[in-house]
Amino acid sequence: MRKLYSALMVAALAPAASAAAAPGAAPVPHHAPTKSNKAKTKKLRLASDPTGSHIGGAVLTNAGDPLPGATVFIKGTYIGTSTNQEGHFDLNGSFANGPVELLVSYVGYETQTVVLQKPEDQLSVSLVPSATMLSETVVSASRVEENIMRAPVTIDKVSAKQVERISTPEVLAGLGNLAGIDVNSASMLFTSISTRGFNTAKSERVIQLVDYMDTALPSLNLSPGNMVGIPELDMESIEIVHGPASALYGSNALSGVVLFNSKDPFVYEGLSVRLRGGQRSLLDGQVRYAHKITDKLAFKVNASYFRANDWIANNFNAQTSSTNPAGSPLGYDAVNRYGELDLTYLPYPGVNPELYGKRVYLPGYTERQLVAGDTITRSYRVQGAVSYLFTNDLKLTLEAKRGVGTSTYQNLSRFRIKDLGTDQYRLELKSSKGFIRAYTTEDFTGSSYELTQLSAKLLQSKSNPANPQSPSYRDLYFGTYNGTYTYARQVGKQSVDAALAAAQAAANATLPVAGSETFNTLRNQIAQDNNPGTGAGQHFNSRLSDVSAQRSFVLGSPRTGLIVGAAYRRYMLGSGGVLFADLDGNRIPNYEYGAYSQITHAMLDDHLKLAAAGRVDFFKNFNPAFSPRVAAVYSLGARNQHNFRASYGQAFRSPSQTDQYLHSDVGSFILLGNIGNGYQGYGFTDAQGRAYNPYDPTMKLADFEINIEKLRLERVNTVEVGYKGAILPNVYVDASYFNSRYNDFIGGTAFVGNVNGSRPAEAVVKSAIVTGSGFNTPEARIIFVSQNNSQVVRTHGATFALTYYLNKGLNLTGNYSLNVLDRSNLPTGFRTYFNTPKHKYNLGANGVVAKNLTYSVNYRWIQGHQQEMPFAAGDIQTYHTTDAYVGYTIPKLASTLQVGGSNIFNETNIQIIGGPQIGRLIYLGLLVDVK
């Protein structure tokens, strides 16, 4: 069955450095202190003599040291800036309407509010260190800016400084250091992320956004991580929402949201350059330049390039589906050998009776042999944006971005993606009350190819291209195997084991040797051929257009708020007939749209915050979906530092575009979408798990009948409770518990049927089996489609995270994650694809040990667990890794020397069954930041 799954080529191929205005759904261009932290926010009434509108000065620690990268905003506007290496800042503000209120913030320090009666150019602001996040704000949890302590759901925030200290080659991999977040690497640059179970290699249940633009490929609804996202130099923060979020984000926010907020050119001006080099021929270069041309016009440009020797998968253990064990002289189906075509010898003329019923496998080729030395992973990203302030509270942004990457991706097979990428364009108008946003995404495949089909098509090639009548390598192999075995037994009088070994050796000698001229010629030809019937090349080129808007209101009292929003998304799918049925050149249209609303109300002197949200989504191919969420947050303490939350939410995932519209005929079988009237056909096993045998009179073909309904939406219902607070002045705790029920999981199935959905005649099916002609006639085909599973699946889990701020030089962190699959109501052998460790924990430390010397170290432990991936199934062994970073800043040179490493003790581990062993990667780098 793996051959059917693995050939489904591209069927789904598939905390803040500042408190700057976070780009978001309902962006507020300032970080106004909430009532919960006003008690600790000082208001300094300053009088000064300078004339004009200039405001300048320095932001310092309470010890008098400068704070580079601190942000200074004029409250209620988009006017702001960040400090340079000496902690200095400059901006212009209008005093025409009275005093100007500045908000000064830096991660790890309490936000300071400064009120100016008139311009001031020698202002000095001291920030007090804070071990808690009492003044930190987020926008992704509720699509409006709010204090992170009072967010109604589990949420994490990673600052630009923390991003700088992430030492994994891909930034998403570093998020695995947080509680409740699982990351899996299919290669060095292709990382998937998930929360609360059901991990896969393609993150289809977590949406990933860059400034609220979806990073998923339109053709596949698959996010390639940050390989084609934004460079780390331009990241202002990353926010991760855990659990269902469809009530505000719609389709596919089944398990969470990852939001990358980029830096505003009005706030983060100057030139930043980062260069890194290290093991595995690592070369990583990034540059960012932003400039405020006038007080109303600013722009930024970003560029990055990354290259290294990729991790190559080399697991040669037998697949769980392999009939024969590893090392068998009959051959076996290895995890990371591809194209192991098999044959079960039947009582045909010329076949040695001793081989009847035995399954023989071709050896196939390894991943390293098939990529033929092309082991370099690389990416480049370029982006430019221009922003214009119509007023202090109304900003227009125009952005263009391209990201291209080469790596290896895993789904139903392993795919070598070469120069796959996206082009994105965004136009956005936003204010403190709302936004109107439009963007487009277009994807392209470059020269990508799929490894299983590459090997299989090579082995199905003619053994003598000059002679059209020559057998294929596959047929030559099986014929040689049978002939050699017969000769060894009948003439050589060898034992069965010796004869099998001789047969295997002789048959192997008939195949092209990897790296030979014959092999390379066939390999290149097939890899570049994107015709599904003859090649392994991939091709798609689809477009997504998205328009959304949101508006916020105050209902009578400031205690009650309302937001309303709507979104429309249109797909235009194109593949030239390779992936979709668009042979005529006309793109296939698809669409979805929805509207949402959320109302919040604070009561009991602002100690209790209530929120209710709901969204309705409509689809071209599915019934409408309603996603509600209700939540309550109760805050205690003099500064509301103890926050208890509870919520209930529903969310859904819509089938991917390939689930819906796939149409790819690979010859031996056909891959189809499932949005019509469903399918009828015959399965490969009956209810007892037996394969059909036409020679067994006790078996009836009717017992193998199956009926597959058209696709529906996946759904989840989740109840969650949690606590976030400062249990001591220097101890911060975040804890949560959730209980979820899932319905209608989408999976795949193979069966014998007709392309039009009808069930083939019994006589046709029996004849194809008896004669060995196969199912590749119009009357009966092997078909692969996506389908829903009606089994209800329940899970529960918990997270606990603690941060202990001992002193400036030592900040201790630790977290624990529990994920439990309830198997009490599941049938024996039922595949859930939970793929999640039950226990996981992180231990870390970071701090500033000298004036300009910073460090960060994290130890991560992941319990072994079972994985059921479409490509392979098996056990992931328990593993642990240690990541570390050290940075030394030279202020006079505006530079930081960086040394870092992931998995520094080289504890090689496999994170995805079928994936590569991830080893050590050490780098040395230089960061230059000129304001």
Image (cartoon, rainbow, N blue to C red):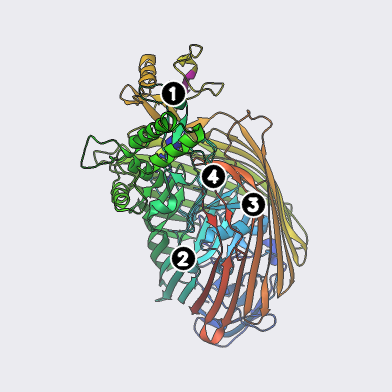
- Marks 3 and 1 sit apart, C-alpha to C-alpha, by 57 Å
Residue bearing the label numbered 3: 180
Q: Disc number at residue 729?
A: none
State which region is magenta: 704-709
The percent position of residue 608, horizontal first and vertical second, equals 71, 51
Q: Disc number at residue 353?
A: 1
Q: Nearer the viewer, residue 118 or 540?
A: 540
- In the image, farthest residue toward the top: 697
For label 4, count other residues whose C-alpha is less than 10 Å away and answer few (under 14), some (14-19) or many (20+): some
Residue bearing the label numbered 2: 231
> Is residue 884 a member of the stretch shown in magenta?
no
Q: Is residue 922 left or right of residue 773?
A: right
**Above-or-below relation of 847 to 606:** below
Residue bearing the label numbered 4: 317
Regarding mark 3 in the picture, which secondary structure is present there?
loop
The answer to whether residue 227 of the structure is visible from this angle is: yes
Q: Which of 833 and 92 is in front in this view?
A: 833
Regarding mark 4 in the picture, which secondary structure is present there?
loop
Cβ atoms under marks 2 and 1 closer than 8 Å: no
Amino acid type assigned to the residue bearing label 2 in the image: Pro
The percent position of residue 615, horizontal first and vertical second, equals 52, 41
Name the residue: 20% across, 42% down.
466
